[in-house]
Amino acid sequence: MNLTAEIISLLTDEAYAVLCQESLQEALAKLSVEKEEILSTRPPFGVLATSQTRLVFQTSLRSALDNEAGLRARLDQLEQIDVWLKAELEQALRSHLPSISGDYRTCLEAAFVVTRWEQAIASLHDISLALARDARGLAAAINPMPTPSAPRPSDALIEQSRLRALANLRITVVAIQSGVADVLEIRDQFKQLCDAEADGLQLPLPPDFRNLAWVDRLAALSGGQATGEAVRCEAEARGFCGDGLKGLLSQSAEVREACLAAGQAILAQHWRQLRAHAQAHFVQERDVDEVIAELSRHRQAAETARRQTSFEAAQVSTWR
């Protein structure tokens, strides 16, 4: 099955842990029946029962309770081992599964593409602020506000300011269209990666930001019309920087969660198949206490190795 030695060892431990839990649960169920039978023989109070009868009852009940406590202690110990085993196995399978499952690898790659898309759409925030600023600058250039200390600019100066503002706006529009193209390219990559398997799952489209054709039309409009267009452009750009961007990132987060959930489902299915195989081929009949002791040693060794690795990593970080 092309499994690593680590995974085989962990699957074997998990299979033994399951068998031990089943054996102990079965013994606990039998003991519960026996305990009820013992309680049904409780002798009457007073002189109706001999001291020997009471002693037999008390001894039997104490033995049953001690056995029950022992079984539950073993089950508690196995529960802790099971938590450790599941964490170790999941981590090992996450590392191994991309090499043997194309579908699982696709899910991971899709989640990574979503992250790249989020970075690309988030990078439009500052450019959008610049677009809002430049659109506002154009409106101000077309309609300069007179002040008591400065006369109204001449028509020639207003025209120069308008042309400079249009030039700035053109540069910003080119930049934002380049950013949008990056977002769309990554979106297409996600679609190509997932379209066949993801049941129509798609990343959201970016907003329809203004393009160069809009700037060219703007240059030909009258002052009032151009001002209105610039004001609307500023409002749309600022809207994207606020709730618009948050909404898009919220949608992309849902897409990534869907990709990761699909990958988790593949991992769980693969794990179930491996668990069944391990229980059929990796274990044999053994003493429960012997197995629990062995599993406890494996867990302790793994935790010791992890602490040592963490210590060495910390030392290397300190030296750097």
Image (cartoon, rainbow, N blue to C red):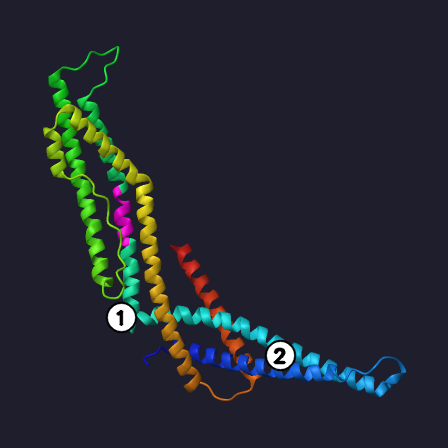
Quarter containing the N terminus: bottom left
Q: Is residue 44 left or right of residue 67?
A: right
On the image, the x and y values in percent for residue 74 come to 59, 77
Q: Is residue 256 left or right of residue 49?
A: left
- The residue sitting at 25% across, 63% down in the picture is 194
Asked if residue 161 is positioned above or below residue 49 in the image, the reply reads above
Which residues are drawn in magenta?
Answer: 116-124
The rendered magenta stretch, by its main secondary structure, is classed as helix
- The residue sitting at 43% across, 58% down in the picture is 314
- Tell which residue pokes out farthest to the right in this image: 47
- The residue sitting at 23% across, 65% down in the picture is 196
**Which residue is denoted by mark 1 in the rendering?**
102
Q: CA distance from mark 1 to mark 2?
A: 44 Å
Quarter containing the C terminus: bottom left
Q: Residue 30's quadrant in the figure?
A: bottom right
> Residue 14 shows which numbered tag?
none
